Amino acid sequence: MTELTQRFVLHFGEMGSRWGINRTVGQMYAYLVASPSPRCAEEIAAALQVSRSNVSMGLKELDSWQLLKRNHVPGDRREFFTAHGDAWDIFKRLAEQRLAREIAPTLSMLREALMEPAAEDDVYLRRRMRDMHDLIERLTGWFADVQRLERSTLDRLLTLGSGVVKLLEHTGRFSTTPTAKPRLEPALGGTQILERHDGH
């Protein structure tokens, strides 16, 4: 590996634990991202200096995250692997898996708890849980809407950056004047936009 590739791989290994995967799996994924051609398990093990069994387990985990693409070379019985998709696809798949593994269980717990009969001593906690539930539900709904956007539309949206706020202010859908509580307003195409009037 080149010095830059090694630096890239080591960093992703350190970041792996923050994403819910171990260091070796993070390094394996980074190595595949950095590789211009498909790699087999033996090549991955040699490059990262880890055991073949660790590579096999790591490949299974990356496959469960839908981050791998299998490739076959004519005349070679081995399986070769590449990182699935481009940067957008990688980010999308990572985000989807984080939502499914971390956010969705919390949302389900909150929803189920809030449907149960309320005890008098739990009024305050239920109010806080309701706030958490509503925020998470809005954020996951927003993420689902973003996933349905065309790539070109998403590129333009990200390019706008804070200009989105100016656009919403111009159309009257958003105000920075702290006069009222936030509320949802229907936007074009049925998408919901959170309109805030509390300065946040």
Image (tube, grey):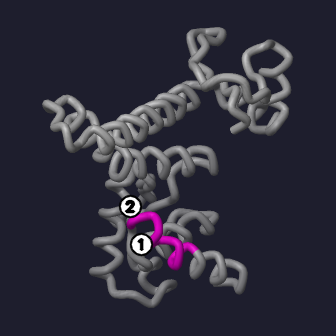
Residue at coordinates 44% horizontally, 38% vertically from top-left? 136
* Percent of width and height locating residue 2: 69, 84
Task: Say which quarter of the image contains residue 45.
Answer: bottom left
* Image quadrant in which the C terminus is located: top right
* Residue type highlighted by circle 2: Leu
Above or below, 131 relative to 37: above
- Return the x and y of residue 139 as percentages of the image width and height: 50, 36
What amino acid is labelled 1 in the image?
Val
In the picture provided, is 187 more to the left or to the right than 141?
right
Q: Is residue 126 left or right of residue 112?
A: right
Q: Is residue 27 magenta?
A: no
Asked if residue 145 is positioned above or below residue 31 in the image, the reply reads above
Find numbered disc 2 in the image and state the secondary structure of the residue it sits on.
helix
Mark 2, Cα crowd under 10 Å, few <14 / some 14-19 / many 20+, is some
Residue picked out by circle 2: 62
Q: Residue at x 63, y 51 (%)?
A: 87
Residue identifier under label 1: 25
Q: Are marks 2 and 1 in contact (CB under 8 Å)?
A: yes
Q: Is residue 92 left or right of residue 193?
A: left
Vertical placement of residue 147 versus 89, above or below: above
The dominant secondary structure in magenta is helix
| Magenta region | 12-20
Front residue of this view, candidates 80 and 164? 164
Q: Residues within 10 Å of mark 1 (few under 14, many from 20)?
A: many
